[in-house]
């Protein structure tokens, strides 16, 4: 038995060929697609994975010299996903037809194939440390984050009903459906009159795959592109963590720990925090609720990874760009023509995730030019990078987007201090060690980047007010990056007494200093509140400051005792390490809530509705618009008017369906649109209905189950009821 364990340990920690490792990491994902969606979906998944890998490798090869290519192969799938998504989005925003997008893809694949062939001699020489462990982590990540959605999201069930696991996935599916039917530029789901000014890039490849290969859109959306992006994120996180680990410790153990930290480490109190969601009526902590303590963003990105939100794709873009720019920086070479490719990467992130793209341009700028700002050449390249970024921003139309127009500065900044304090002390946990990258003076670009990440992303979250609380993306991305920054500093001997005591002492010092800064800032803000005679944030001041002062004293005392007593250092570090390790249970809460349906947030269409919508898809041409009185999801706890099911399943444009996303209610003519839409179903005057339909170019009326239009019978000759429409009433307007 001991010999078997020893052999397993050697297998997990030894060097493996990169081709073998990437195949083993890929295996659980394609197996999951095969068993949840069938052989044709698995074949499409394999083809898409080859596509993004080849496309990404062509970019990596052109951007970096041969000496750096072997260590950047793991970034190729994430870079390819970024390029395919971005170029497809640009293509559609420029009004070009979706059907020709595969020609663009094939061009990238051909370039990648040539690059792979010319570098074929490098592959046998390339090895990966901890490849066996990475393969096992890939299996676990696939089971936790991919399988729940692969089984239950965007799926036609055996009884004929159709299900999404969350309202956001339904909205994104509707975006993909609109792209598939040929809308160029795409329209807002559920509002066919408006262009979509949103980062729809991650969902465009699924639409193209379904359109070209005939694969069901649900399989392309929830299984093929989402699965490939998660697989790419695992590899790119491992690559960036390894690069950072080599800089911090000289070893590669931090690479595998970065993957574990990103996907599984979060808030120490995630099991004791109450989940509140407008889509669910189920609340309460997994174990029990601790009052007055809430951690921002669940302490990690877990729910976003399970649901396949745009953050998954934005995070992949950030990590890939940071990895490639870090490799370029380590070459200690002046940027040549190859560098222009790296300068274009933040622009490619724009259609994938707008907030992530803003961070990406900062990442690229600091890693490539920090310490070189005295040269005129550097400023010319910086200007070029910003110009490319602004062109991409303009193409996507973000300068006219509702979120950008409604952005304001938060008025209750002082009251957010307690939230920040809880996030720092409880939400980060072990990840506080990531602050060790910050050194003085800030001559090291990585040190400056970590500091800029903290200040920039915290400011984004705590100072700005965006629609639907999208400013929280700053905290999400900061926590993700700190997972990689912190865990990349670990060594294989971190659990042993000496090294454990050392990093626990570092953790105590960082936590103490951070709390001192927070306490000092709260006193300054309290003085400002007193001077201005404001009544905001006074009542809770004592309840907030007292535990923080106690915590500062406790941290300072523990730090002093660990320096004086070796025995206390050994015991105390073991106890504190055990407490911090609890953070590896944080993923359980969102996995139960979002992956296993504890909060019951599924959006389901009955078999009769599905049959009717499929019938509508057969009857109506792709560009023919329909009107419906289905706007709300009755099971939602609040904001029920978020149903995009009819647009999604029929793959036909709706005049107005769900309307609480993408700023539809902010349109100047929204009230008129809503009134006219409802009037088509409530009026008893045929001419009124006909005039409204003509005004809004409506060809079909779709009444939800149990309802009908109010026109008296017999119907006018220009209004024809359709047969075999399941539980729906569908009428054609001639």
Image (tube, helix red, strand yellow):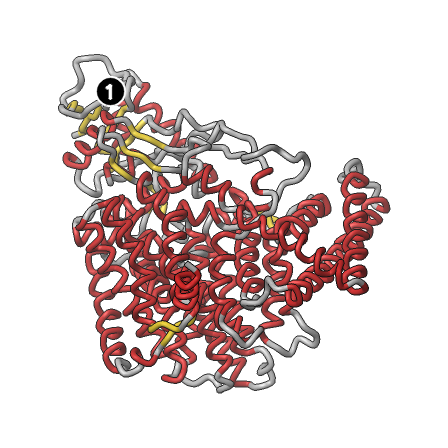
Q: Position of residue 284 (x, y in %)?
A: 56, 31
Q: Is residue 296 above or below residue 725?
A: below
Quadrant of the rendered image containing residue 188:
top left
Whether residue 686 is visible to the viewer of this picture, yes or no, is yes
Q: Is residue 391 above or below residue 411?
A: below
Quadrant housing the C terminus: top left
Q: Which residue has dot 1 on it?
A: 686
Whether residue 394 is visible to the viewer of this picture, yes or no, is no
Q: Is residue 197 left or right of residue 558?
A: left
Q: Mark 1: give few (<14), some (14-19) or many (20+) Cα within 10 Å.
A: some
Q: Is residue 603 left or right of residue 450?
A: left
Q: Position of residue 310 (x, y in %)?
A: 42, 51
Q: Nearer the viewer, residue 717 or 614?
A: 614
Helix, strand or loop for disc 1: helix
Q: Residue at x 77, y 44 (%)?
A: 547
Q: Nearer the viewer, residue 223 or 277?
A: 223
Q: Is residue 492 above or below residue 467?
A: below
Quadrant of the rendered image containing residue 17:
bottom left
Q: Is residue 294 above or below residue 390?
A: above
Q: Is residue 723 left or right of residue 549?
A: left
């Amino acid at each position: 038995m001991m010999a078997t364990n020893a052999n397993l340990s050697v297998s997990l920690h030894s060097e493996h060929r990169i081709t073998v490792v990437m195949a083993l990491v890929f295996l659980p994902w394609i197996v999951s697609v095969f068993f949840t969606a069938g052989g044709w979906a698995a074949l499409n998944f394999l083809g898409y994975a080859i596509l993004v890998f080849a496309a990404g490798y062509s970019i990596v090869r052109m951007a970096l010299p041969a000496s750096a290519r072997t260590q950047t192969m793991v970034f190729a799938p994430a870079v390819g996903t970024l390029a395919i998504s971005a170029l497809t989005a640009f293509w559609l925003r420029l009004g070009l037809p979706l059907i020709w997008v595969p020609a663009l893809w094939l061009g990238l694949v051909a370039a990648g194939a040539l690059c792979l062939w010319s570098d074929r001699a490098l592959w046998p020489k390339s090895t990966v440390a901890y490849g066996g462990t990475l393969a096992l982590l890939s299996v676990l990540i696939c089971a936790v984050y991919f399988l729940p959605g692969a089984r239950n999201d965007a799926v036609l069930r055996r009884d004929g009903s159709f299900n999404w696991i969350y309202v956001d996935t339904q909205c994104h599916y509707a975006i993909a459906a609109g792209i598939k039917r040929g809308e160029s530029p795409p329209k807002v789901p559920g509002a066919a009159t408006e262009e979509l000014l949103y980062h729809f890039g991650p969902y465009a490849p699924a639409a193209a795959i379904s359109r070209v290969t005939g694969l069901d859109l649900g399989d392309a959306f929830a299984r093929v592109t989402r699965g490939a992006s998660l697989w790419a994120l695992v590899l790119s996180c491992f690559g960036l963590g390894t690069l950072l680990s080599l800089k911090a410790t000289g070893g590669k153990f931090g690479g595998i720990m970065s993957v574990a930290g990103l996907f599984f480490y979060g808030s120490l109190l995630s099991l004791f925090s109450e989940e509140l969601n407008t889509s669910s009526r189920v609340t309460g902590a997994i174990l029990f609720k601790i009052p007055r303590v809430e951690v921002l963003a669940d302490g990690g990105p877990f729910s976003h990874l399970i649901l396949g939100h745009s953050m998954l794709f934005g995070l992949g873009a950030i990590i890939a760009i940071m990895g490639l720019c870090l490799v370029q920086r380590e070459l200690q070479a002046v940027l040549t023509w190859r560098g222009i490719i790296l300068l274009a990467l933040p622009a490619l992130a724009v259609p994938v995730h707008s907030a992530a793209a803003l961070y990406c341009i900062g990442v690229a700028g600091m890693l490539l030019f920090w310490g070189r700002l005295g040269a005129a050449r550097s400023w010319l390249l910086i200007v070029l990078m910003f110009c490319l970024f602004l062109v991409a921003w303009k193409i996507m139309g973000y300068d006219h987007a509702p979120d950008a127009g409604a952005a304001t500065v938060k008025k209750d900044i002082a009251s957010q201090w307690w939230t920040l304090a809880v996030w720092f002390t409880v939400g980060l946990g072990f990840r506080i060690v990531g602050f060790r990258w910050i050194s003085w003076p800030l001559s090291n670009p990585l040190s400056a980047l970590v500091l800029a990440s903290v200040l920039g992303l915290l400011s984004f979250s705590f100072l700005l007010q965006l629609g639907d609380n999208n400013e929280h993306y700053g905290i999400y991305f900061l926590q993700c990056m700190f997972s990689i920054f912190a865990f990349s500093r670990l060594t294989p001997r971190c659990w042993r007494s000496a090294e454990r005591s050392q990093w626990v002492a570092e953790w105590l010092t960082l936590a103490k200093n951070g709390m001192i800064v927070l306490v000092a800032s709260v006193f300054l803000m309290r003085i400002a509140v007193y001077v201005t005679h404001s009544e905001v944030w006074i009542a809770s001041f004592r309840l907030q400051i007292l535990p923080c002062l106690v915590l500062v004293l406790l941290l300072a005392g523990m730090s002093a005792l660990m320096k004086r007593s070796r025995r206390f250092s050994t015991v105390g570090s073991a106890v504190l390490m055990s407490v911090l390790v609890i953070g590896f249970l944080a993923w359980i809460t969102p996995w139960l809530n979002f992956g296993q349906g504890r909060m019951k947030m599924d959006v389901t269409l009955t078999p009769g509705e599905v049959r009717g919508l499929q019938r509508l898809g057969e009857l109506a041409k792709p560009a023919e618009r329909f009107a419906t009185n289905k706007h709300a999801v009755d099971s939602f706890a609040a904001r029920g008017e978020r149903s995009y099911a009819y647009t999604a399943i029929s793959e036909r444009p709706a005049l107005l369906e769900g309307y609480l996303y993408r700023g539809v209610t902010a349109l100047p003519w929204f009230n008129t649109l809503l009134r006219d839409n409802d009037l088509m179903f409530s009026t008893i005057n045929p001419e009124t209905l006909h005039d409204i339909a003509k005004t809004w170019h409506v060809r079909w009326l779709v009444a939800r189950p149990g309802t009908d239009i109010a026109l008296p019978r017999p119907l006018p000759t220009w209004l024809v009821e359709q047969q075999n429409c399941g539980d729906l009433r569908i009428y054609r307007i001639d």
